[in-house]
Image (spheres, helix red, strand yellow):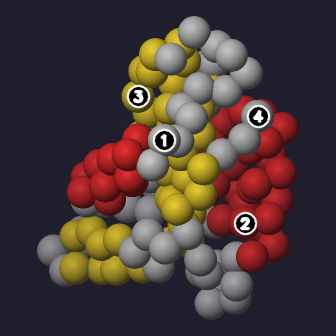
Amino acid sequence: MKSFRSFTIALAAVVLCLSSGCALMERGAEGGFVHFFVVPKTMPDGSSAKEQMDALKVWLCDKAGGYTELPDAPGGWMNHQGGLETSDQHAFLVSAPANMKDEITAYVKKEFAETDPYVMVWKAEK
């Protein structure tokens, strides 16, 4: 995803999860980090990203103990030519005791063929 993603998607996702009683901290940690990121529903060649999505969910459970998925998270951004681009994507909220931004970014780049993954991180308290 491009670095020009709308902040509105992230804010809406966080508000939605907080208002629905989403548990932000796993494994009983007293503090940690909340990660918000998006992945495409389709691969660059137009094929479904379902296989990659299933593997991502297993990876998140292994690395962070779980995830919250927001499956319909369409987004838009301005491309380098100044035009609006949009895509259908899945959004995830993941809490972990450590900052996983670099790991998530590398995973999304490799498995979803994204050049500039959109990953935001907040410090959290339980």
Residue farthest toward the top in the current orientation of the protein:
30
The residue carrying mark 3 is 122
Mark 3 or mark 1, whichever is nearer to me? 1
Label 2: how many Cα within 10 Å (few below 14, some 14–19, many 20+): some
The disc labelled 4 sits on which kind of residue? Answer: Gly
Which residue extends farthest left? 82
Task: Please tell me whether mark 1 sits on a helix, a strand or a loop.
Answer: loop
Q: Amino acid at mark 2?
A: Met
Residue picked out by circle 2: 53
The residue positioned 57% from the left and 9% from the top of the image is 30
Disc 4 target residue: 65
Q: CA distance from mark 3 to mark 2?
A: 23 Å
Front residue of 119/16: it is 16
Residue 66: percent from left, percent from top: 72, 41
Looking at the image, is mark 1 or mark 2 nearer the viewer? 1
Distance of label 3 from label 1 (alpha carbons): 18 Å
Q: Pointers 4 and 1 in contact (CB under 8 A)?
A: no
Mark 4 or mark 1: whose residue is earlier in sequence: 1
Specify the quadrant of the image occupied by residue 54: bottom right
Of residues 54 and 23, the one nearer the viewer is 23
Q: CA distance from mark 1 to mark 2?
A: 24 Å
Q: Earlier in the sequence, mark 1 or mark 2?
A: 1
The image shows residue 32, relative to residue 63, as above or below, that is above
Mark yes or no: residue 19 visible: yes
Up-down relation of residue 22 to residue 16 (above or below):
above
For residue 103, side relative to residue 1 (left or right): right
Could you tell me how far apart the alpha carbons at marks 3 and 4 are, in whole angstroms? 18 Å
- Which amino acid, by three-letter code, is at mark 1? Gly
**Which residue has dot 1 on it?**
21
Query: Where is residue 95 shown, x and y percent of the image?
Result: 59, 32
Query: Type of residue at label 3?
Result: Trp
